Amino acid sequence: MMKVRIISVSALLILLLPASVFALQMPNSSETFAESLGLTAKSFLVIDNLSGNTLLAKKPQLSWPPASLTKLVTALVVLDTKPKLTASITMKKSDEVGGARIATKAGIKYRFKDLLYASLTASANNATNAIARSANLATEDFVARMNEKARSLGAQNSVFYEPTGINEKNTTTALDFARIVKAAFENPLIAAAATIQNYSFRSVNNSNFFHKIKNTNQLLKDTAFIADFSFQGGKTGYLEESQHNFAALIKDKLGNELIIVVLGSQDSTSQFRETKELAALAGFARMFTNVPQMILGSSTPSSNLKN
């Protein structure tokens, strides 16, 4: 009886899923499909990291402010300078630009590694500006390197104006940022900072400044999700102008890796719920790789990530 039931369910999926796949290809079906799943994101992209194939997408070339996702580009540029992890960095008043921050002040010193974690784990803007300064470049030169880095990764439609993401003029696309995600989370230090749930550190010149930070990625403590997927990296980003953004590299129990970029979800809960739904749906999409990539809001198939 159990065998018959399994066969019946499988047959039903085979009958139903291709219809859904072809529906996703229709250029006018994007909003209807997104609404049917309760997806609020203005743009999203799911890519099989090993093959580079697009599995799911909605408006993947829509220009959008990435907010604190920008910090991944900053981290890549800073780490290209081969910094010493134990190097001491002195906080400056100019590091304060508002938004998320660690509670500190000018003159307090921290190890580079601790500020990198504060930037990527807790999304602290003052820590991000401090590590950017540690590259010993003028701000405009550092930003120029951010844009050069993005272009070198194939992110041709992205532009950055400062390191933290607080400037809404920073823009990217889901397709561009998938390329940035791939490069960022292949770096072991960035991946470690982006997957740790909690991190503690203390100033090197004033023991009164002790910090306990938590990862802004709420899916790290979602036991149901973690039972099926492990994080290779994840980063949140929020501005009023951009709403809620999330980018991640995850792996399932079979070793399949997914790059997921979600831009413009309506609230902090939606960015994570929609990531979970897209991760689950991607498994079905992979079953139909002989069908042109499933594009929402486009009548043409997407580019392979490796192109």
Image: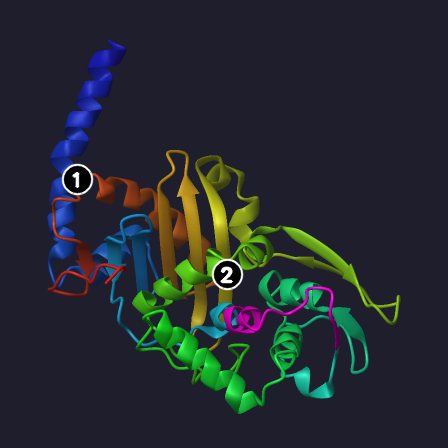
Could one spot residue 304 in this view of the protein? yes
**Which dot marks residue 235?**
2
On-image quarter of the C terminus = bottom left
On-image quarter of the N terminus = top left
Foreground of the two, 159 or 239: 159
Amino acid under disc 2: Lys
Q: Which residues are magenta?
A: 74-89
Q: Secondary structure at mark 2?
A: strand
Pick out the residue farthest to the top: 1
Q: Earlier in the sequence, mark 2 or mark 1?
A: 1
Callout 2–callout 1 Cβ contact below 8 Å: no
Of circles 2 and 1, which is in front?
2
Mark 1 — residue? 17
Quarter of the view holding residue 39 = bottom left
Q: For the point 58% across and 57% down, which residue is it?
A: 189
Q: For the point 46% across and 85% down, which residue is it?
A: 144
Residue 292, compared with residue 152, is above or below; it is above
Amino acid under disc 1: Leu
